[in-house]
Amino acid sequence: MPESSAVPTVRPTGSELSAEDAKLVILARGARGRVGAVEGAAVRDQDGRTYAAASVSLPSLTITALQLAVASAAAAGASRLEAAAVVTEASTLDGAGHAAVRDLAADAPVHVAAPDGTVLGTVTE
């Protein structure tokens, strides 16, 4: 996966996710599991629509799950994101995916979860 050198800090969450944010984790797990991808992601736009994606690694194209989910939202006309979730075996959020979310939302939380759905923490900056 392409990664930016700036890796955002994942801070443990102090409370349970809202039902809508928990749904993002479920969608991200499903996207990852369907194709056996390294990671899955989901985002929710300003209208409550959700977009899920899995990481892609082809000889001519490599894109993180979060980048693809954000691109899908933008292609569908989303102008703002409310929240995002990434399911990954890594304990950090990749810089490229984080940057893609920040293109559409300066303050949307990005929840990072393990493959079993356990939320490891949230990036808010």
Image: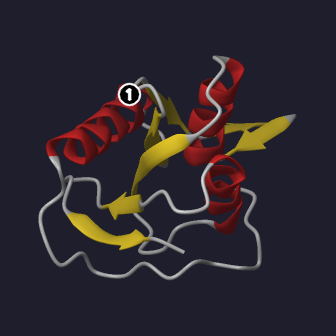
Residue that label 1 marks? 48
Residue at horizontal 17 percent and vertical 78 percent from the top: 14
Q: Is residue 105 left or right of residue 6?
A: left
**Which one is in front, 80 or 66?**
80
Position in image of residue 36 (x %, y %): 42, 36
Q: Is residue 24 left or right of residue 70?
A: left
Residue 25 visible at all:
yes
Position in image of residue 68 (x %, y %): 63, 36
Q: Secondary structure at mark 1?
A: loop
**Which one is in front, 54 or 121?**
121
Residue at horizontal 28 percent and vertical 80 percent from the top: 12
**Which one is in front, 58 or 17?**
17
Q: How many marks?
A: 1
Q: Amino acid at mark 1?
A: Gly
91 vs 45: above or below: below
Position in image of residue 25 (x %, y %): 28, 45
Q: Is residue 8 left or right of residue 3?
A: left
**Which one is in front, 70 or 28?**
70
Residue at horizontal 37 percent and vertical 26 percent from the top: 34
Residue extending farthest to the right is: 60
